[in-house]
Every structure is written in C-alpha cells, then in structure tokens.
Image (cartoon, rainbow, N blue to C red):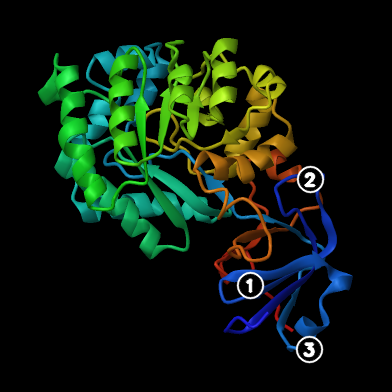
Amino acid sequence: MNAPGPLTLYRNARICPSGDPDEIIEPGAIAIQADRIIWIGNDGEIPRELSAAAPRTCDLARRWITPGLLDCHTHLVYGGCRADEFRMRLSGESYEQIARAGGGINSTVRATRLASEESLFSQAARRLKALIAEGVTAVEVKSGYGLNLDDERKMLKVARRLGESFPVTVYTTFLGAHALPPEFAGRSDDYISSICDETLPALQDEGLVDAVDVFCENIAFSMSQAERVFKRASELGLPVKIHAEQLTNMGAARLAARYHALSADHLEHLDEAGVLAMKSGGVVAVLLPCASYFLRETGQPPVELLRHHNIPLAIATDSNPGTSPTTSILLAMNMACTLFRMTPAEALAGVTRHAARALGKSDSHGLLAAGRYADFCVWDIDSLSELAYWIGFNPLHLVVRHGATTSGACQPDWR
C-alpha cells in the first residue's frame, strides 16, 4: 500500500476478475496505484488505509468490469488487400485453388515486400485501433508475409513499434514457415533450412521474436518440416505454436503436443487422438470462427470433444487479409457462440484467461488480482452474456491499461 503515485479507486461495480461469470464480486471495487492493482474486493470492505488516503474515486454505477481482452492470434501487419479473392471465392473457387493459382498468402507477400515500414505501420495501426476500441489490451502479431530475412524483420519491427505507439501490449510471433516464397519454388526443404539456419536465429538475436509458429498443411509445410522449425526454436529457447488441422487432419496437433506448444490453432479437422495429445502436452486450443465463417467452412472444431477432455478454449480474430478480414474481437466471440456452439461464458474465458494461456502470459494477463497490472474493461451492459450477444454494437464504457484510462465511450467521472 506504500507504492508511489496517486491512488485511484473504482467503486460500485460488478467485477468478473477471472473471466468466469460464476466468480463475481458485487458490488466490487478496485484500487490502483501507478500501473498495478493494489486491492480488489467487495465495495463495503475497502481497507481503512485506502479510504483514508483520499483517493481519486470513480463510481461505475454498477457497470461490469472484466480483465482486458486479448487477441491471441492475428496477422495485423501486411500490405495490400485481397478483396478480389473474396469475389473469386463467392464465384465458387476454393481457398486451395486460389492459393495454387498464385493468390492467397503469396499475393500478400508481394504487396508486403513492396511496402515501406512506414506504410505497413500506418495500415496496421488502423486495424489495431479498431481492436483497442473493443477492449483489447494485449495482442499477438505474427510475421509471415515477408518470407525472407529483411522483410520478416521489417514486419516484426512494425509490430514492436505498434506496441510502443499505442496503449496495448504486443507479442510477436515469427511465422516464416507460412508459405513457400517464389524464389524457393520446388525447394521447400531448402527454405526451411534458411529459416532454421539464418532467419530465425538472426531475428531472435535482434530481440524481435517472442514465439514461433508454423502453418502445417497440405498447401504449406509438412509435419517433418514443421518439426525442424520446432527443434530450432526450442534450441533458441522460444515457445512454439502451430496452425493445425485447418483444411485436413495431418496430425499437427499431436506434433504440437510433443513440443508442449502454447497452442494449436484452427482445428476444424481435429480428431480425438489429437485432442488427447493436446491434453497430455498442455496445449491450448485457439478457435478462429471468423475465418471459418469467411471461408464458409462446413467442418467445425470438435468443441464438445475439447470440452469433454478439459482443453482450454481460446478465441481470436485471426485478423488477416485473405481469410479473416476482421478487426472485431466481439464479433469473434459472437461467432464462436453462433457457429461453434460455445457458451457466452466460454467465449469470455476464451478472450481472457484462456487467451492469456495461449500467449504463455497467464502471469500477466487475463486475471484481475492485487499485484498484477491494472488492465481491465468497463462495460455498459446488464449481463456478461451481452459481450457475445450483440452484433455490430460496442458496449465498451472505458478501458484502463497499466492504470491509465486509454479508450472507451466515456471518461471516468472522478469524485
């Protein structure tokens, strides 16, 4: 209670500290000093020494407080636009057909390589602002549209700069194994060697990489190639994650389990063997319903099977130019419920505590408790279910990140 800086007290709220609607403090209060929560509890039990400190006080009029939301799977940094491919898909061409014809990821690679760092920052900033406006306080940003050392570095530098320029924590993921670049056509093993021997070690040395991802799929990289990247990442002390079982069941989730990956993402074609492996390896399932919707996928992740085996279910936007051009975490929550039959409570957990685990950051995100960063959202709603219920409506009242009010429809009414 002797931390430096002014004391701030938010009172008369309904608080959901862990993203679990069954754990509620009502009426609740949160005391903040500097960037940390120093006390959280029942409004009628505020310690005397806090009340005596004459803090700035904000009456939240029974509004809801949740942890700051997390978007644990995005591709926010890229050049260009792929609206023409959207038109092609609507005329009947599949994602795989478009990719094999030179579209898909490689069309974004071309645009990203041509774009300057400043242009990439400007484009990504617009997308990031939209996420922040819906209560996102931490976001993962993947590379994977450069596919060579210089352009992957450019993307990751932009991602780091986003975190320095906006009130959001940015975690970077190296996704060099996203697609085969044209200069390596027919030489996918050689490209994986260049990732393992040159690109990844260089970027790690420069402090640009927090985690490593691989797109393991029949139009991308094989299990053996993914494992080579995982081995190199492990040697460098970096956690791994994987795009798994999106278009086919290749067994990528089982590979993720062997390397104790943070997460396996997509999972539309996951089977029970993969689910059991994920459980044994402590792997979080990251579901990406906006991509499933945009691609009009008929298959769905086996949510009931994942529930049965107590696999943590995270939700993310997968914000990207080709298969999920969304910047709305609230829409992702709604689609997780409507398309995948998750409950509103599961959706909230999926963008708070389970998303934190998918980032490997459960110690700093997804939970409100004394001693942790003061990152939380205040919502102007009657029920927490409304966060997954509304479509195209944002009930955010305000956001507090690291103790400071950063965004929202209103500013605190200090007393």
Q: Residues within 10 Å of mark 3 (few under 14, many from 20)?
A: few
Q: Which residue is mark 1?
A: 411
Q: Are marks 3 and 2 in contact (CB under 8 Å)?
A: no
Callout 1, which amino acid?
Gln
Q: Quadrant of the C terminus?
A: bottom right
Q: Is residue 169 left or right of residue 69?
A: left
Q: Earlier in the sequence, mark 3 or mark 2?
A: 2
Residue that appears at 28% across and 24% down: 228
Q: Residues within 10 Å of mark 2 (few under 14, many from 20)?
A: some
Q: Position of residue 114 (x, y in %)?
A: 15, 42
Rendered image quadrant of residue 413: bottom right
- Mark number displayed over residue 52: 3
Callout 2, which amino acid?
Pro
Q: Earlier in the sequence, mark 2 or mark 1?
A: 2
Badge 1 element:
loop
Q: Residues within 10 Å of mark 1 (few under 14, many from 20)?
A: few
Residue that appears at 72% across and 70% down: 39
Q: Nearer the viewer, mark 2 or mark 1?
A: 2
Q: Which residue is mark 2?
A: 21
Callout 3, which amino acid?
Ala
Badge 3 element:
loop
Badge 2 element:
loop
